[in-house]
Image: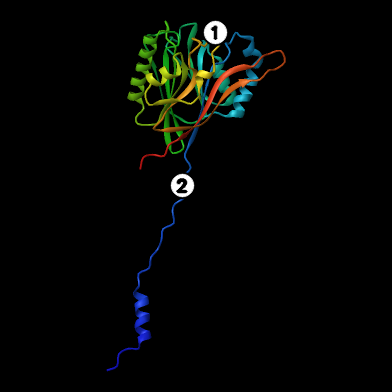
């Protein structure tokens, strides 16, 4: 009996060889970004508001922040400057205050959003004062959710102990309401930059070298060495992409009008 020809054995061996398929790497999903502005608008009775509010609305319509927070809002009647601005930009508006609706003048802050708001809330920081109500808004960002808190850590009286008490209240509230979502705080901070970071561990200011900008005494910004308006973000959840001041340029006999800052943040990739 003759053995099969050698070429036939070689062909059978080739047919039985396993096929190796190499998987192509999946395209990386771009990380979601979030832009947040922390502002203080001119008072409603200030001529600068009457003459420049349209320019303010146009500037913010160009910048298109996802969320705008406004400090030191005074509401008389049913409308305040922040919610007027929201109506022009077609944003939602939440007025954050501890004052009862029956009060003629109500003091607080405002949160404006062009993103879908999933949840919101209000708490009171101690010691209480005209602007000691803090607010929270949970918005949809990409396929996830982000908590945005607004607070003015300038207690009355403004002492280091009172500021730390308010910071502790805020951190406790964040821990109780964040539900594991990335969180940031847009606010006005009376302490120095190092004290702000020390009082709110895990959070980092978006504004670089804020101590280089000296606040003007009498401008309603508190202490000369205060940190000022900024956005603090959780280092574990965000990376700062860029930040910029928001201001109106000189117009005729009207000087530069500083409004605040805007931070553009990139969400970190989830662990694993």
Q: Residue at x 46, y 47 (%)?
A: 28
Residue 243, position as x, y percentages in the image: 53, 28
Q: Residue furthest left?
A: 1
Secondary element under disc 2, as helix, strand or loop, is loop
Secondary element under disc 1, as helix, strand or loop, is loop
Instruction: Choose the circle earlier in sequence order: 2 or 1.
Output: 2
Q: Quadrant of the C terminus?
A: top left
Residue 88, position as x, y percentages in the image: 60, 23
Which of 27 and 116 lies nearest the eye of the viewer? 27
In the rendered view, tell whether residue 268 sits above or below residue 130: below
Q: Residue at x 40, y 33 (%)?
A: 237
Q: Residue furthest right?
A: 252
In the rendered view, tell whether residue 181 sits above or below residue 169: below
Q: Residue at x 56, y 10 (%)?
A: 216
Quarter residue 171 falls in? top left
Query: Which mark, by number, is residue 28?
Result: 2
Count of numbered badges drawn on the protein: 2
Which of 133 and 191 lies nearest the eye of the viewer? 191
In the rendered view, tell whether residue 177 sits above or below residue 156: below
Residue 217, position as x, y percentages in the image: 54, 8
Query: Which mark, by number, is residue 217?
Result: 1
Which of 4 and 126 lies nearest the eye of the viewer? 4
Q: Residue furthest bottom?
A: 1
């Amino acid at each position: 009996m003759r053995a099969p020809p050698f070429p036939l054995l070689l062909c059978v061996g080739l047919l039985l060889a396993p096929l190796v398929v190499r998987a192509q790497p999946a395209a990386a999903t771009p990380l979601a970004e979030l832009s947040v502005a922390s502002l203080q608008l001119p008072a409603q009775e200030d001529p600068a508001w009457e003459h420049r509010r349209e320019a303010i609305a146009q500037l913010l319509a160009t910048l298109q922040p996802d969320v705008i927070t406004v400090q030191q809002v005074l509401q008389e009647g049913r409308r305040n400057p922040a919610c007027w601005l929201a109506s022009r930009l077609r944003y939602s508006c939440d007025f954050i205050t501890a004052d009862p609706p029956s009060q003629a003048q109500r003091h607080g802050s405002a949160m404006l959003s062009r993103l879908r708001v999933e949840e919101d809330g209000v708490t009171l920081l101690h010691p209480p004062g005209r602007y000691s109500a803090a607010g929270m808004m949970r918005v949809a960002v990409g396929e996830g959710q982000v908590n945005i808190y607004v607070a003015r850590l300038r207690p009355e009286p403004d002492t280091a102990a009172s500021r730390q008490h308010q910071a502790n209240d805020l951190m406790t509230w964040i821990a109780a309401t964040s539900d594991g979502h990335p969180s940031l705080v847009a606010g006005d901070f009376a302490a120095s930059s190092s004290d702000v970071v020390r009082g709110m561990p895990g959070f980092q200011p978006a504004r670089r070298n804020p101590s280089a900008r000296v606040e003007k005494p009498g401008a309603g910004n508190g202490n000369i060495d205060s940190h000022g308006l900024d956005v603090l973000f959780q280092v574990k959840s965000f990376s700062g992409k860029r930040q910029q001041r928001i201001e109106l340029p000189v117009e005729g006999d009207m000087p530069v009008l500083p409004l605040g800052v805007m931070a553009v943040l990139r969400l970190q990739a989830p662990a694993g």
